Amino acid sequence: MVTESGVSGLDGMAEADIAYVAAAGAAGLALSVSAWAWRFRNRLSAREEALEREATTTAALLADRDGALGAFDDVRIALGPDGQALTLLGAPHAVMVARTALTHTGISDLDVSDAEALVQSIRTLHGPSLDALAHTGEPCDLRIETAAGAWSVEGRSVGAAAWIRLAPLKASARVVDAGLGVLADTSPSPTWVTDATGELVWANRAWLAEVKATTLDEAKAANMSFDRGADQMVGEAGRLGIRQEGFRWTAGEGRRRAWKIVAEPLIGGGGAVLTFAIDMTEAEETRDTLRRHVEAHDETLNHLADAVAIFGPAKRLAFHNTAFQALFNIDPAWLDERPTHAELLDRLRQKRQLPEVIDYAGWKARELEFYGASEAAPDDSWSLPDGRTLRVVRQPHPLGGILLLFSDMTNEMQLRSRYNAQIQVQTATLDKLNDAVAVFGSDGRLRLHNEAFETFWSLSSDRLVEAEDFDAVAELCKSVLPDPGLWLGLKARVADPDPESRIAVSGEGRTTDGRVAAWQTRPLPDGATLVAFSDVTARRELEQALAQRETALEESQALKREFVGSVSYELRTPLTTIVGYSELLEVMGDLNERGRQHAGAIRTAASQLARSIDDVLDMAQIDAGEMELSLEDVRMRDVFADAVERFRPRVEGRGAVLKAACPKTLPTIRADPRRVTQAIDHLLENATRAVSDGGEVRLIAVATASEVRVRVEDTGRGIPYHLQAHVFDRFVRRDRGGPGVGLALVKALVELHGGWAEVESEPGKGAAFILHLPVEAVGRAVAPELGLKATA
């Protein structure tokens, strides 16, 4: 038997409603902003008046609260964090009655304040509960019996304060407690109370009957338990102070019984827990019987290939099989919410899985009219927008409602539709290609071609249709590409059934109009062969132009190297003569001092020009990839010592100081000592030109795990920020010197060793050039070495 069950759902909001709400919200927002601005201006002017009214209202409210507290017999005490009494609220008469009653319970110190006396009296009887309230804010509900009657003590925390409320219990309250006790004892549900340690404190008659005990004392003595699993829930409720619920099965009297266990911690009970068990056996047995019946019915319907949906008398979905969910691809979670028949139709319409009709409301109303039918309706068919055709059977359900059966009749039609769509897509794709493509079947007939094929061979579509097979098409194309061997080879790839002959091939040929045509074939899985032609004339011309450019570039590079070498040789020869004669003039005895200065200036300029020529030659050699490094074990301390000896006179001649710092523990590096010295000399020369009187040049070396950093600093005028990115560029005029390749050569020499160079400068505060030299040179210019290690 199948019954209807479900959860009510909400109709989805239509898109028009959403747009309307959005427009209304925007308009409301604009009005709200305008109203806010107007109210803000008025609020400023009325602020002072509102504050005065608030003060008056607050005073009246405090008076009302004081009157309310004094109108009753209860007393309230505020406790501090240490449990001491801070504030006492209540009518004087109520405070006197409370102290008189509670003093008889153990308070003897009558000199203390009323509040402290009452707190001490409560602490004597319920100290742990009072401490828990003050320290952790744990609420408590206590009861104190006195000679004058019973008193209720309630403890609550508000914010950082804890409050105690003392009130005498009326006779009616005691009567209610007695009535509740009788009610609990006579309840048919087993009920019991345990203390903080889990020991049984009280149990009703139903509990004693379940555990086969005559009296409560007997149950305590035998340590009887209703159920060990229930005891665990009771312990968890007492430990966490949170209500616990669970479901337990017990065995007794030859049958299994189901119980719903509820464990409720008692507020202020010091960890006590009230537990009761509700007998759910009959309900569970009925539910289990119904479940087995429904599962058997569902299992039968789920084995059907057709989609089945059953709606109850209330027009809600009561059952659906897996085929129904798969047929319409509906979210199973949404179906589990048991939507109505109308909601299902709306959802299917949103998913475009209903027949498209002009009057959907009328069609929907006719669908829902079948609930009143007493006989099965004639079979119907739905043509869905996605191309499927469904057969729909409607018949009344024996328990009320309607049973719908859907059969998908579109497998064959869908396959045919997909095939036709695939052919159309394939044809459209080929038409978008620039290459001329034709597909020939295994029988040699032309199956399809694109528009580029007609354009490439200057053929009309009608002539290709008339040609039909490969031989006829080849005859039409030979007027453009008269290569008999090409067409024989293509025919073998198209018509030969041997798999080895149908391998992919490609080639090129020249047409009668001077074009370069590239062709290729590809065998297709269905036995057909694809033949593609493309015009690669522009590509080949571009490749030829690039090859010519590359040849010209190589020739220009060779010419540049030859020119640089020739010019350098022609310049170095007279420079050597100039330097020699200038040195001779300097040592001649009959030359006056001014003449010696002129001769020294000539020698210095000639030497500088010779170094510039050497730098240009080195850069040309590096650019050509012809410079190789001669690696040796280099001690930077020796390099620094030589550099300081050479440059100290020049630096001091400018009124500056040269300082060097090189740790003794600096490791030996594998490098070309000549090129490293050359790079450091360029940096020191650059720093010497930058400093002036009172300046300083520093040469520093620091080692890391994989490299040695050489730092050359000066206190000159620095380098502007916009020039720092180009400081290592060649032939760029710099503020720190004339045009040249010095710093560019430094960077190139360091990179040959596998390192790199950088600059740090702040305008007006000098500059620092850092060379990062690896311990082992790994540059492309490093000549191969034997794997021998130098020994100290």
Image (cartoon, rainbow, N blue to C red):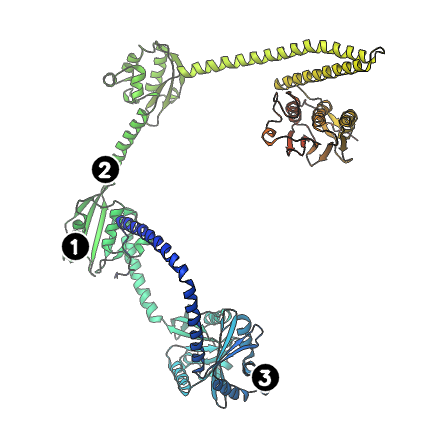
What percent of the width, then of the height, locates residue 660? Answer: 76, 32
The Cα–Cα distance between marks 2 and 3, rounded to whole angstroms, is: 100 Å
Q: Is residue 331 visible?
A: no
The Cα–Cα distance between marks 2 and 1, rounded to whole angstroms, is: 30 Å
SS at circle 3: loop
Is 387 located above or below residue 21 in the figure?
above
Labels 2 and 3: the sequence-earlier one: 3
Mark identifier at residue 413: 2
What percent of the width, then of the height, locates residue 11? Answer: 27, 55
| Callout 2–callout 1 Cβ contact below 8 Å | no
Residue ID for mark 3: 112
Q: What is the three-letter code of the residue carrying label 1?
A: Phe
Is 462 located above or below residue 130 in the figure?
above
The quarter of the displayed image where residue 665 is located = top right
The quarter of the displayed image where residue 484 is located = top left
Q: Nearer the viewer, mark 2 or mark 3?
A: 3
Residue ID for mark 1: 370
Q: Is residue 394 visible?
A: yes
